[in-house]
Amino acid sequence: MVTFDGRAAGTDPQVWDPWLRGLHALPRPVGGRVVVVAAHPDDETLGAGGLLAELAAAGRPAHVVVVTDGAASHPGSPTLTPAELAVRRAAEVTDALAVLSPGSPVTLLDYPDGATREHRAAVAADVRDVLTRGEPAALVVGPWRGDGHRDHRVVGEICAELADELGAELLEYPLWMWHWGTPEDPAVPWERLRALPLADRSVVLKSRAVARHVTQVRPLSPDPADAAVLHPDFVRTFDRDVEVFVTASAPMPQPLGASFFDASYARRPDPWHLASRWYESRKRATTLAALPRERFGAALEIGCSVGTLTELLAARCDVLVATDVAPSALTSAKERTAHLGTVQYLQHDLADGVPGGPYDLVVLSEVGYYLTRPQLATTARRLRDALTADGTLVACHWRHPVAQYPLSGDDVHRTLAAELGLTTVVRHVEEDFLLDVWSRDPRSVARRTGLA
């Protein structure tokens, strides 16, 4: 049985950070209705606020169900009666969701705080009604059953049972685990934890929404019975650029290795039509225009494919090392650039490390999402270390979902930005692709060339 004091600081949030970097990414829900269930008003914000913001930004606001009234958070308070506290907490969760996901329907079931076990059958019936009302829920998001709080366990069990009954996917969010647990604790379900990378906007909105739960994050009065329920250190646990969920026994995401690319090139010599589509030609022009220097010394292009970008990069570099995991792609690239004497080709898998260096320029175009999140994080740090003192890294990736890719294009760029720790000198965003340029030299092009 887990015991803990919720008003104490608990485990330092920074203890978890190195471990969270190794988590595989959770794909964003792409279809169907999502229902987020909370045991108490504020659970949905702390545990799934980022997910709610991401879904809202995608035009798919989730339905939120709050099971209890939260009236037991301040027993013995001289300031608010339980009935008054219940009214305050209902207003707070409404305000928080207006920040995170204004279009989300909210159902407050108002069961007594701390009595979910005693009302289990009725709670299950009410939650089932929400899940089956209109379009059946495709994804149920609820508290983690191992969180160490009785209400969380009971509501989590109900969510799991109903998801199984209705054939819906289930995600569980831990809350108090971050407080009482440590990374080495055998109770932490590392094999089933996944990290949902959050956009900067979602991180900001979640922080603002947490602050709306005033009765939980601030004292009601100087009286000890009115102390804040959530210690500031505990609140910092949820101020992250990822949100962590416990998944079902899903297969571990796998990188797309050499066999995937060999099969792709066996079907067509140019699988992604890089040489024939104007879309690709325009994207190459955009990439070249984003380079912050007219010319580079040594450069590395990762995943050169048939050499369409390689040919253009070579004109801007003294030496260009172009790599690919597929031999047939390298053969095509060599033929395309046979008239150039500055390109060195290398069959290489990025997961094995960074070949050579240091480099003034590294280009990572349409390859980051073939790696898992831990692999990409490690690769980003290796690439950073392979840059010269004023080196530049360019990344460009497709933004539309591809089922077999371990990461989305947006997730690739979030991971790169976090792990590189370099200045963003160019950021170009379209519906179809994302282009970022990071550099050890933080100056703009005008400053580099003496215009400013």
Image (tube, grey):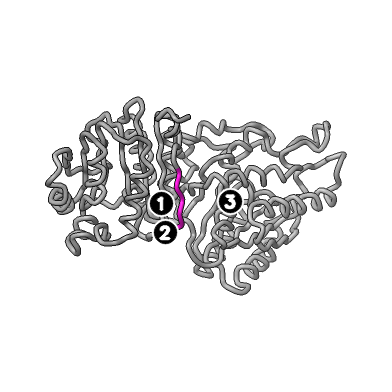
Q: Is residue 10 left or right of residue 451?
A: right
User: Hey, what amino acid is under mark 3?
Assistant: Ala
Q: Position of residue 50 (x, y in %)?
A: 57, 49
User: Does 430 appear in magenta?
Assistant: yes
Q: Position of residue 171 (x, y in %)?
A: 52, 56
Determine whether 211 is above or below 252 in the image: above
Mark 2 or mark 1: name the one nearer the start of the chain: 2
Q: Is residue 283 left or right of residue 125?
A: left
User: Hey, what amino acid is under mark 2?
Assistant: His
Residue in the image at 75% along x and 59% along y? 110
Q: Is disc 1 in contact with disc 3, using a CB cutoff of under 8 Å?
A: no
Question: Which residue reaches farthest bottom?
Answer: 134
Magenta-highlighted residues: 427-431
Q: Is disc 2 in contact with disc 1, using a CB cutoff of under 8 Å?
A: yes
Mark 3 or mark 2: name the one nearer the start of the chain: 3
Residue under label 2, please give it: 400
User: Hey, what amino acid is under mark 1?
Assistant: Gly
Q: CA distance from mark 1 to mark 3?
A: 22 Å
Q: Is disc 3 in contact with disc 2, using a CB cutoff of under 8 Å?
A: no
Residue under label 3, please give it: 48
For mark 2, give the secondary structure.
loop
User: Does 415 appear in magenta?
Assistant: no
Residue under label 1, please give it: 409
